[in-house]
Image (cartoon, coloured by chain):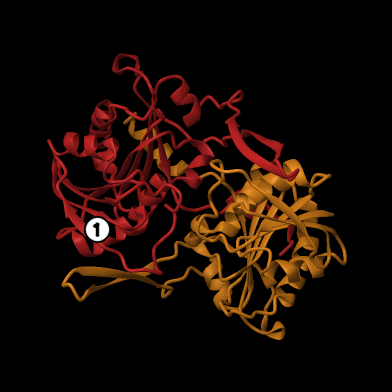
Chain colours: A orange, B red
Amino acid sequence: MVILLTNDDGIHSYGIRDLSKVLSKEHEIYIVAPDRERSATSHSLTLHKPLRAKEVEIYGAKKAWETNGTPSDCVKLGVYVLLSKRPDLLISGINRGANLGTDVLYSGTVAAAMEGAFLGIPSIAVSNVSFEKKIDFTLSANLTSRFISSVEKILEPGVIFNVNVPDCLEEEIKGFKLVSLQLRNYKNLIETRVDPKGEKYYWLYGVPDETSSDIDSDINAIKRKYVSITPLHWDLTNISLLEKIKNLGIF
Amino acid sequence: MVILLTNDDGIHSYGIRDLSKVLSKEHEIYIVAPDRERSATSHSLTLHKPLRAKEVEIYGAKKAWETNGTPSDCVKLGVYVLLSKRPDLLISGINRGANLGTDVLYSGTVAAAMEGAFLGIPSIAVSNVSFEKKIDFTLSANLTSRFISSVEKILEPGVIFNVNVPDCLEEEIKGFKLVSLQLRNYKNLIETRVDPKGEKYYWLYGVPDETSSDIDSDINAIKRKYVSITPLHWDLTNISLLEKIKNLGIF
């Protein structure tokens, strides 16, 4: 397959490089990724300034470009301008750190996969739940390769997968698990402090509250050392509430 | 009701001020909003620097604070620290510019409403589709007030509504319309130019392609001059694809 890789950790991250190395054994790899970490602005498109793309050498990739844009910009640039052929598949990642449950709504890695799906390209977001600075992503890349083979036949336009790899040794991984997203609650802790002038200021810090994880959820799958697989869609419409309101005749 | 207002256009925008003025006739209003426009970083939480909140006077509001945080920060600060009582309802807006279809996934206005819902507070995102610099939001605020009265009985924790007001005169508005989000396609146009040094650069610009809007969609409702009402949820799991894959026995 022709595969376009992008991410939000930047083109210099180990995650995208290990992915390129491993997937290039069986696929034709192109990379269009941000020139630096773009986690904060990753949902956005750059409309207010021109974009640049510079060709770079990445092991395994037939061609690779770094851009000054966001992950979503990279997907558009890759598909519409830089690649000479249309990709069969887009992979966003491998992200350093989990993208689980409702956090998916805030994820740049997943946003890039959604962008691919909007352009009609089957897309996969892959994350490794470890936040270590130096992760070896080879295992995650190998698992991604196996995952692609498993789902190759159902990679139709509009299909999006969110994949998370647990932080453990290869022999500890129990396999793939098809699961739903779970509402990720945080114990939202805010610490109020007082500065030397006597003014208050606040530190936000969120600790995930995972005491009540659903058995069939992505969060629980990761806890149990499975690779979590969740098919996503883009439709935030709450159909059941919509039907309920219709039946009530409010509108 | 006790209502907390926030937005992503900033506390100085007309949208939130007109909302405060109108809703304060019937409700107890509190405002916690960014001190400037925060559209770009609106999905994010501020964990890397301390937050400040400064009390300000806003017409209609019992108390109001401007903060250096994002809309999501504002919701957390309001609920956990600043307000002395728990709000019955959160309203994010009134946004200048539409939040329709799949664009909702990228909207700071909607993100703030989702944050409210995560904290168990019924939440409404309100946008006016006009992009004019000087909109009179009074009509939109009056419509929001009417909308609140209509749905007051079903404002349970977890309920999120996305409301868009069309850009037209009061007498032209046909009423409220309960609709689904529509996949918003863009004609993704990228213009390639060459700078004086002979290097290529790219301008992204997206023109919404609304030739094929679904009859029951928010985009179509706005076109027909209805106020679009869409109940939202946070779950991006594609249940039907998940079931299909289960049936295929892939995992």
Relative vertical location of residue A16 with respect to residue A245 in this rendering, above or below: below
Residue B16 position, x and y percent, is 26, 40
Q: Is residue B206 above or below residue B83?
A: above
**Where does the image place residue A85, in percent across and percent down from the top left?**
83, 45
Residue drawn at 73 percent across, 41 percent down: A80
The residue lying at 41 percent from left, 34 percent from top is B97
Residue nearest the viewer, comparing B72 with B245: B72
Q: Is residue A30 visible?
A: no
Q: Is residue A88 visible?
A: yes
Expressed as whole percent of the image width and height from the top left, the position of residue B88 reads 22, 50
Label 1: which secondary element: helix
Of A183 and B202, nearer the camera is: B202
Apparent side of residue B202 relative to residue B2 in the rendered image (left or right): right
The amino acid pointed to by label 1 is: Gly
Residue at the location (53% across, 24% down)? B215
Q: From this view, report whether residue B146 is shown above or below residue B80.
A: above
- Describe residue B51's horizontal placement relative to residue A76 as left or right: left
Numbered disc 1: what chain?
Answer: B
Q: Position of residue A181 (x, y in %)?
A: 53, 60
Q: Residues within 10 Å of mark 1 (few under 14, many from 20)?
A: many
- For the C terminus of chain B, give its image quadrant: bottom right
Residue that mark 1 sits on: B78
Give the total of numbered labels. 1
Please, which residue is most extreme toward the front here? B196
